[in-house]
Image (cartoon, rainbow, N blue to C red):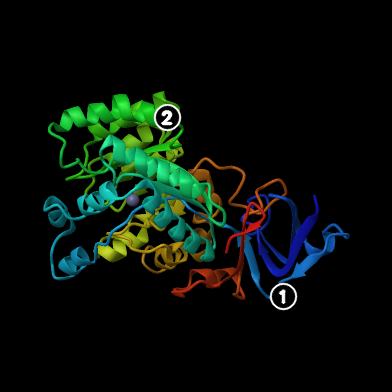
Amino acid sequence: MRQRGFAAARVVTCDPSREGPLGTVQDGAVVFEGATLVFVGPRVQAPPDVPLVELGDRVVTPGLVDAHTHACWVGSRHEEYAARLAGADYRAVARGGGGILSTHRAVATASVDDLADSLTSRLRRMATLGVTTAEVKSGYGLEADHEKKQLRAIAIAAGRRGVPAVVATFLALHALPPAAGDRAAYVVHVARELVPEVARERLARFVDAYVDEGAFTTAEARAVGEAALAAGLGVRLHVGQFTDVQGAELAAALGAASADHLEHVSPAAIEALARAGTSAVLLPVASFTLGGAAPPVAALRRAGVRLVVASDANPGTAPTESLPLALALAVRSYGLSPDEALLGATIRAAEALGLTDRGALRAGARADLAVWDLPHEHAIVQPWGLAKTHLVLAGGEDIG
Ligand SMILES: [Zn+2]
């Protein structure tokens, strides 16, 4: 197969084996064959017979990895946003049948093709923003048939051309479905029947649960998390968005791949996350939209917890598809350095999804990269409000 490549003023590898916080190579080159990178390094060391497309002063980075999205949805939540701006509380709106339940109604009445088409459009727009891998959760179906319909829609969209690679997560406990008579019976049904079915049908790689006051308890999430591990699936948990109900402790105890949100988390839980190797997935767009607090980033950093930044793309609390917007807010509102934010959307995000073949530019990795119409990688985290990519490749194919 023919080798192709690029040369640019700055090749930001995010490869920890290279020097500097982002392993940046000045006057660098990347060469790939098919879906795989075969050379990353100084241009003068590139294989001499490979034609290099000249990118001039542009910056090349690994393709971005969005490790937390709810991108498979239909409908609109604009009325609820207006109500919240007028003073209504998010959780009061949810108790009144808005919030997650409002998107549940839209998803329950949509066909699998409608859901797949809506997700495909969203994934294509994400690609233009530099994203080459996106995690996508179910969680709006709530009832077994609709959850599986949502997961099938995710698989259909993932199989289409021109979209980022997709990692599917079964968000098993998001809200109690309106028709569920008995709460305890619902959790048992999800843990004992639905999780093993999803694993058997290979509809998801991870299982997630929303652990918070007014959502699900740690005991309920533990039942579902243990079922996931027994079925060979990984665990990620929404914890501490509104209240610390010790969801982070549960994430650490289960050896979860990630604990997400973490606006409210204790010092002891931070230590537990560090010991367990559980990544912290920070979601600053949701804090912005809800006017909420920032997570204790300095304490997480000090403890050595790996920091990931994700979009949280969803119709209610993070109505965006833009991981670069999340990076801008992570720097501005959460106090991450530009380097931390970029690592959190590349190699750290890939690690949090259990993917070792991407997130860094190095020989042998997937040819996932973004070329930015920007003079320096630190400009990526400025709040542009529009796509600043020149080119986006996923597995060596142009998707952006
Ligand atoms: Zn979420």
Residue at horizontal 40 percent and vertical 58 percent from the top: 311
Left or right of 102: which side holds 52?
right
Residue 28 seen by the camera: no
Residue identified by numbered label 2: 199
Residue at horizontal 45 percent and vertical 52 percent from the top: 307
Residue 205, image x, y percentages:
46, 37
The amino acid beneath tag 1 is Gly
- Quarter of the figure that contains the C terminus: bottom right
The amino acid beneath tag 2 is Ala
Q: Number of labelled discs?
A: 2
Res 190 quadrant in image: top left
Residue 47, image x, y percentages:
85, 57
Crowding around mark 1 (Cα neighbors within 10 Å: few <14, some 14 to 19, many 20+) is some
Camera-side residue of 166 and 29: 166
C-alpha separation, residue under disc 2 versus residue under disc 1:
47 Å
Helix, strand or loop status at disc 2? helix
Tell me which numbered mark, 2 or 1, is placed earlier along the sequence: 1
Q: Are marks 2 and 1 in contact (CB under 8 Å)?
A: no
Crowding around mark 2 (Cα neighbors within 10 Å: few <14, some 14 to 19, many 20+) is some
Label placed on residue 130: none
Residue identified by numbered label 1: 56
Left or right of 269: which side holds 59?
right
Residue 29, image x, y percentages:
75, 62
- Residue 323, placed above or below residue 175: below
Residue 167 seen by the camera: yes
Left or right of 203: which side holds 190?
left
